[in-house]
Image (spheres, rainbow, N blue to C red):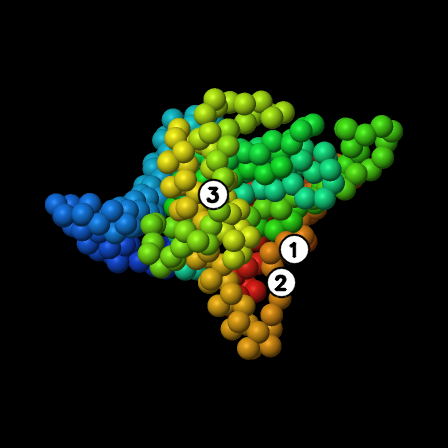
Amino acid sequence: MELDLSADIAALRTTFSDIAAVVDLDRLRGEIDALSAEAGAPDLWDDPAKAQQVTSKLSHAQAQLARVGGVAQRLDDLEVLVELANEADDEATAQEARDELQALRTAIDGLEEQTLLDGEYDAYPAVVTIRAGAGGVDAADWAQILLRMYLRYCERKGWPTKVMDTSYAEEAGIKSATFQIDAPYAFGILSVEAGTHRLARISPFGSGDKRQTSFAAVEVIPLLPETDEIEVPETDIRVDVFRSSGPGGQSVNTTDSAVRITHLPTGIVISMQDEKSQIQNRAAAMTLLKNRLLLLKREEEAAKKKELAGNITASWGDQIRSYFLYGQQLVKDLRTDHEVSRPEAVFDGDLDGFVSAGIKWRKRKDD
């Protein structure tokens, strides 16, 4: 037995070298040194907002360096593994090398996508909100399926998540849910999932074999450090407090600790019930409201520029993907034409193909 993966490894090294050049490891190390010096300043936390920004940037830069450095080491280790397999004439070790080759292809593809994430907010963590749309109880059930799908996707990637608010529907499913993803580039990666998702299936809730079409909206915003750029006067908000609830309206908290903030000028509503106290929930809701308003401001500025250029297109609420669970079993993205014939795998969080195609589609569209 002679295992020869030299051509495959050489191709991966070429791609990896291009990625490393774009990332600019020397610049990244310099940035980490500068941020580490700032983070070590004794008066850092005199300004909590600045401290959070510095520590967040440092964490993101360190994570990026670790990812790139980890792939470089794995490429070296793979060559050693191939040598061991050939010296020992061991098929088990050879198969281990083939598996690692495939894993490295996936890892390098992920790094390559990251080099395309150069938007203003792409490097930040994310907050995802899923809302049931038209379709009654089926839509509420569909929203809950999407929530599980994205949480499983994050779990597969090792991203920490925290469900911040869930509004349960009366019969089944959810009216809406919001969760936070505390991982670098979560916003840049998942922002391509924002839009309307359509499910076509035989309804499990109706009588007969009637096809039901349901809709749910996915919103993705960056989780930004505390910022003074957006001021929210008290006169612009209405704050309601209520008891946290579980499925079917079941109370899970005996005190009025959950908070709902309505921004009166825009109609934006933020609910928060995950924290232990009303004060904590209000603070978390205000942070999320400021992030939403800052992103809205940026979108309005970008839309104005496109309008002046004579090319304005709607994006929020556009249908981006269809999921078919009757007749043909298919999930198809309407922007990239990427499709998968195993919806169950997609619902279990296997979204890498859709996300990768979406990132590349967005880059081509923006260039």
Amino acid type indicated by mark 3: Val
Secondary structure of the residue carrying tag 3 is strand
* Res 214 quadrant in image: top right
Point out the frontmost of discs 3 and 2.
3
* Res 209 quadrant in image: top right
Mark 3, residue position: 239
Mark 2, residue position: 314
Amino acid type indicated by mark 1: Asp
Q: CA distance from mark 2 to mark 1?
A: 7 Å
Seen at 34% across and 54% down, the residue is 227
Q: Position of residue 20 (x, y in %)?
A: 35, 55
Seen at 62% across and 33% down, the residue is 174
Residue 256 vertical position relative to residue 34 in the rendered view, above or below: above
User: How many other residues sit within 10 Å of disc 1, few (<14), some (14-19) or many (≥20)?
Assistant: few
Q: Position of residue 76 (x, y in %)?
A: 33, 41
Seen at 76% across and 42% down, the residue is 213
Residue 108 vertical position relative to residue 137 in the rendered view, above or below: below
Amino acid type indicated by mark 2: Ala
Q: Earlier in the sequence, mark 3 or mark 2?
A: 3
Q: CA distance from mark 1 to mark 3?
A: 30 Å
Q: Is residue 330 in sight in this rendering?
A: no
Q: Position of residue 99 (x, y in %)?
A: 48, 34
User: How many other residues sit within 10 Å of disc 2, few (<14), some (14-19) or many (≥20)?
Assistant: few
Q: 113 or 69, which lies in front? A: 113
Q: Position of residue 200 (x, y in %)?
A: 76, 40
Mark 1, residue position: 318
Q: Is residue 227 in sight in this rendering?
A: yes
